[in-house]
Structures are given as C-alpha cells and as structure tokens.
Amino acid sequence: MFSWNYKSTFLAMALGLVACGVPGGQEPAQEPVQPPAQQPQQPHQHQPVAWGQAPGATQTPITTQPFQPAPTPTRPAPRPPTPKPAETKVPSSSQLPAAYQQILDAHNQLRARHCAQPLRWSANLQAVAQDWADQLAGANCAFEHRQPNRFGENLTFFAPVGSQSPAGVATGWYSEVQQYDFGNGKFDFQTGHFTQVVWTSTTELGCGVSQCNGGEIWVCNYNPPGNMMGEFSRRVLHPDQCVATSR
C-alpha cells in the first residue's frame, strides 16, 4: 500500500534549488548601473545671417549708389526728302523692234500727205499678220490673202533676204499712187495697196514677216479695214485737198 510522505518531497525540491546555484530563500545579486557622465553645456551663440545667405557664408557689404535718371534719347535730325527722278513718258511704239518701228513710221509719213491721221501699232494685228506670214512660208511661199478676214491686208514678197527695208515695203505699196485716178475714186487691183495705206478711217496697224525660198514675205493688217466700196472719194484724198484744207 502506497503512502505519500510530503516531507520527503519538500526536501527533494529544496535540494534541487540549491543545485541550480540559487541559495534558497535569496534573490540573485544584480550589478549597479552607473549613469553616463554629463558634459558641461556651452551657451549657444546666434550669428546674424543675411536674408537669402547660407549660414557660414561670408557676407558682402551692400553699397548703394545715388539714383541717376536715364538720359533722354536724342532724335536724329530729319533727312530731307530725296527728290524723285523725273518720269519720262515713252510712247508704246518706241518699244517695238526696229523693223516694225520703221514700217509704222513710213506708213504715217505717207498718210500725212493725204490728210490721214497717224496709225497706232496693234499687238493683236501683229499676231494675226505674223500667223498668216508663217502659214504662207510653210506652204512653199504661197502668196494669197487670208479668207475670210475682217481686217484690211497688204502682202509683199522679195528676195534675197534683206534686199528691201521695212520702210521700203510701205513705200512700195504707196508707189501705186501714180496709177490711181482721184477724179474717179474706186477700187482697182492695181492700186489697192496704196488706197489701204492712206485710208483715212484706219487707225491701227500690225505687221508680221517670215522667210521662205531665200526671201521675205511681209503681211500687214489694218483696222478698221480700207477699200470699202462707195467710200473711196472721201477716204482717199488727193494731196491738194490737204493743202486747201490747211489754208
């Protein structure tokens, strides 16, 4: 039969505590903790720092200058206006090639003998005349009037090239005046070139020239056209009529 002896148990527990190194009934000894040594505090000195300057930077003293007003700019003296060169009016006909200017001047000199007003050069008539001259040259130097044609027209051909001047072309047409009957004014194939040159109601002239077969073919167109039936007596005037009119 088992019997528990509480005294033996208590004694064994007490012996175990002694074996662990802790005296029975005492707390483990603890080492005292030393507080850290305190350094004496130095009083803080505040240094003035300029606005916008990093601490520790050397401060540069600011010097002020007395206010100086800005100088008033001076305006340069106005320059006198540059005189414009005188304008020279150049007649449009003076810009023509020499050959066309010569045939125009010759027409006007011959027309003046018959009280006919001077002609103006027409670029449009020149283009029409040049086109027909080129067509005639391209057709193996054909010689015929354009049909139909709302302008007056004179033609001539001569060879070799340069054997006749542009003024000589107009003079050749005018030479038919020797065969014209002023007393019985009417159209005639022998004088039709002359009458067109001096026709008083014509105001514009344009000519063209082309080369073929070693010669030159000239075409001149007139506006308004001359050689209108029933008007020869008042459109082709005798030189004496001009003299009488001027008196």
Image: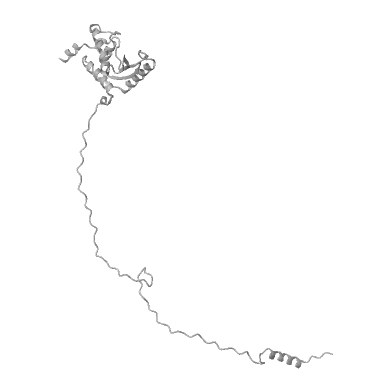
Does 220 sit above or below residue 40? Answer: above
- Quadrant location, the N terminus: bottom right
User: Which of the two residues, 192 or 4, is positioned nearer the viewer here?
Assistant: 192
- What residue appears at the point 23 percent right and 16 percent down from the top-left corner? 110
- In the displayed structure image, the side of residue 27 where residue 212 appears, left or right: left
User: Which of the two residues, 229 or 207, is positioned nearer the viewer here?
Assistant: 207
Furthest residue toward top: 184
Is residue 198 at least partly visible in the picture? no
Residue 38, x across and y down, in percent = 47, 85
The part of the image, by quadrant, that contains residue 46 is: bottom left
Is residue 232 at least partly visible in the picture? yes
Does 148 sit above or below residue 20? Answer: above
Residue 156, x across and y down, in percent = 31, 14
- In the displayed structure image, the side of residue 232 where residue 143 appears, left or right: right
Residue 200, x across and y down, in percent = 25, 15
- Quadrant location, the C terminus: top left
Residue 37, x across and y down, in percent = 48, 85
